[in-house]
Amino acid sequence: MKITILLTVILCLGLFLPEAIAQKTTSTTGANVITTGVPFLTIAPDSRGGAMGDAGAATSPDVNSQHWNAAKYAFNESQMGIGLSYTPWLRNLVSDINLAYLVGYKRLDDSQTLSASLRYFSLGDITFMSEYGDPTGQQSPNEFAFDLGYALKLSDYFAGAVALRYIRSDLTGGQMVNGTYTHAGNAYAADVSFYYQKEMRSNRKRSTFASGINISNVGSKISYTDGETKDFIPTNMKLGVSYKTEMDRYNTITLTFDANKLLVPTPDTTKTDIVTGKNSNIGPIEGIFKSFTDAPGGMSEEFKEITFSAGAEYWYNKQFTIRAGYFYEDVTKGNRKYFTAGAGLKMNVFALDFSYLIPVAQNNPLANTLRFTLSFDFDAFKKQKR
């Protein structure tokens, strides 16, 4: 049982820290990686954002805005849309870990929009073993999150949104570990986001500048036992800017840039539990404020905790698109560095997109990551039906 739980923990951490796990954490590298519970919440679920280096806080509104910045829904031109995304995850390690994402929105009027999403993460089949190496059962660990969002246009250029989230994580299937009963972890969280966009005209060409902020997963901790051990969920602050311009009547290009920071305490083994490296006595809100000043290395380490995403998107005649991007994380905070690319085709009613991840390091578990997204525009369907 101990072996199984250890493997499960390593697998969960490996979702986002593949190079940190592969390398030894020594004083020579100064590695001090921040880990949280339910890290699947930070995976880019759709192909568009995944193709632009995981950037999306300030890109133009689309059906998948719920993950990146729900306030963007207030500026969506369509009245209603739905999208379905699928991601085979960590294909270089295993073949049965997958992420599915269902999202949709409905405009109530010119100012208000409702949205909802369901994210389901399957960790495949795991055979549980006792400490003596005997099989004790087989489980299919899984996690999911369900969201409801509300976006409100506050002016012609500015909008805000809130989203409420229920999170459930079942990693052990109720197995007993070292005499302690385990159960599925449950947590509640909320997102608060804002979005600004301004259209400009120059030489008969339209351009749009946009910026956005999304503070996501502000909520309770999560626990898998009835004891006092609780983990922070990945509270995160995402800041982004974008610039979209018409090259001519048929061609447009968008450049975007995001910066992200986890708003959870930095591990410090000199002040926290020597086993977990986390200060379990700190509450979620206190942890948010401490996250800006608690790095053992001071402000220089705080800045290293910021990840950066840059992306570009080209559209031809609003029907065909190609995308590219780059994601950067400091070597001491996980060392994720990868390029991304993707393409998409928009028809009258449906749109199909895909993206591909290209890691900088060799033998990276994130290599060969593909994302597929299919979206449906109800307005276009009604017009076609007429």
Image: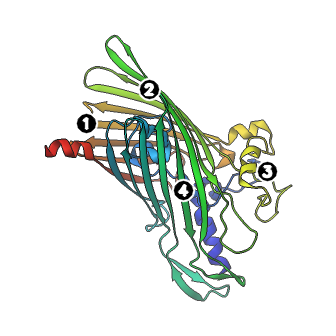
Which disc number belongs to residue 195? Answer: none
The quadrant of the image that shows the N terminus is bottom right
Q: CA distance from mark 3 to mark 4?
A: 38 Å
The residue labelled by disc 3 is 27
Q: Please give left or right for residue 372 compared with residue 366 in the image.
A: left
The residue labelled by disc 2 is 156
The residue labelled by disc 4 is 165
The quadrant of the image that shows the C terminus is top left
The residue labelled by disc 1 is 319
Answer whether labels 3 and 4 touch (C-beta < 8 Å). no
Picture quadrant where residue 225 is located: bottom right
Q: What amino acid does circle 1 point to?
A: Gln
| Number of other residues with Cα within 10 Å of mark 4, as a class: few under 14, some 14 to 19, many 20 or more | many
- Decide which of tag 3 and tag 1 comes sooner along the chain: 3
Q: What amino acid does circle 2 point to?
A: Asp
Q: Secondary structure at mark 3?
A: loop
Q: Secondary structure at mark 4?
A: strand
Q: What amino acid does circle 3 point to?
A: Ser
For the point 45% across and 38% down, the residue is 72
Q: Please give left or right for residue 195 compared with residue 375 in the image.
A: right
> Residue 266's x, y, as percent?
74, 50
User: Depth-wise, is mark 2 or mark 1 nearer the camera?
Assistant: 2
Task: Judge whether residue 108 can be spotted in this image.
Answer: yes
- Decide which of tag 3 and tag 4 comes sooner along the chain: 3
Residue most extreme to the left: 386
- The relative height of residue 246 versus residue 377 in the rendered view (above or below) is above
Residue most extreme to the front: 109
